[in-house]
Image: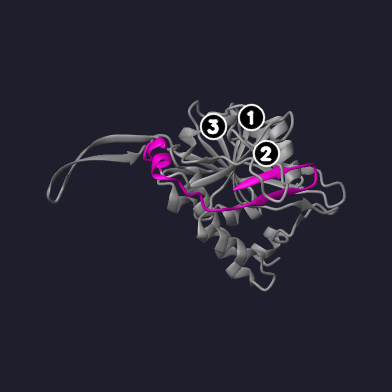
Amino acid sequence: MACSISSNAVRCYTETLRLTPRQQQQCGRVKPTPSSFVSFNSSNQTLGASPSPVPRRSIPVRAKVAASEGSITESNRMLVFVPPHPLIKHWISVLRNDQTPSPIFRSAIAELGRLLMYEASREWLPTVVGEIMSPMGAASVEFIDPREPIAVVPILRAGLALAEHASTVLPANKIYHLGISRDEETLLPSVYLNKLPDEFPENSRVFLVDPMLATGGTIVAAMDLLKERGLSVQQIKVICAVAAPPALSKLNEKYPGLHVYTGIIDPQVNEKGFIIPGLGDAGDRSFGT
């Protein structure tokens, strides 16, 4: 995916990457399509770039496709990953439909969260190696290290639904609840529940889960709380269903180097702070209230 962003709009297009045999050799046998990303530069909000611009209907953007996070070295930029998996597109479509009933909506957003956390945990989970006996003989094995559980921080209440299946993806995890409400008039965030530890262990890894990154007030407030408890940007990954330019711009300005995983990027936020076309109110639709 390639995208361009301005203060009130983002334009994207997606196409299948095709490589010649020579290009495939140059990629070092790595298939280059598990995750597309947008990188934001705080000075001009342009994308991580390949050597030449992509001409497509005069949209001035350049594309870069990463085989994995291990091949990305732009630590001074915030990266927004939009995994091109068809199941992610399917669940986003189910969530968008205004006819989707609440139980189906909650199930769909939980499935979307599972897929996004799976993608975000790639090359990020601590492991231990050893040897066990299978029914047929000795085997070398690698397990997720249970001594270093991943912390999952859902922002209530909609974050609960997106993080519902975290334990099915992460064999070792801890859940810390964070309640932040948004004033409907001022759109400013207010913390009403904080179950975060006073300080996170030194090598912690944290998934911060919030379905809708709209104006950016809530997610920035949550990031501030995590930073106050000893976490660096490299120890945090944001998981969301839908993101919009205002929130991404705020995160990029304050937290360069952050990684955000989203199901889709929508172009704008209306005067009431809702993403357009978005999903509506993810909390109301998840819990039927």
Label 1: element kind: helix
Residue 25 falls within the magenta-colored stretch: yes
* Residue 181 image offset from top left, x and y in percent: 75, 48
Highlighted magenta segment, given as a residue range: 1-30
**Residue 74 occupies which quadrant of the picture?**
top right
Image coordinates for residue 183, horizontal then vertical, percent: 82, 49
The amino acid at mark 3 is Gln
- Give the Cα distance between marks 1 and 3: 10 Å
Name the residue nearer the viewer: 68 or 23: 23
Q: Are marks 1 and 3 in contact (CB under 8 Å)?
A: no
The residue lying at 54 percent from left, 38 percent from top is 206
The label shown at residue 222 is 2
Colour pattern: one colour
Q: Nearer the viewer, residue 213 or 90?
A: 90
Asked whether residue 191 appears in the rendered view, the answer is no
Q: Which one is nearer the viewer's eye here, 104 or 44?
A: 44
Label 3: element kind: helix
Q: Is residue 179 left or right of residue 273?
A: left
Residue at the spot of label 3: 235
Kindly identify the amino acid type of the residue bearing the numbered disc 1: Lys
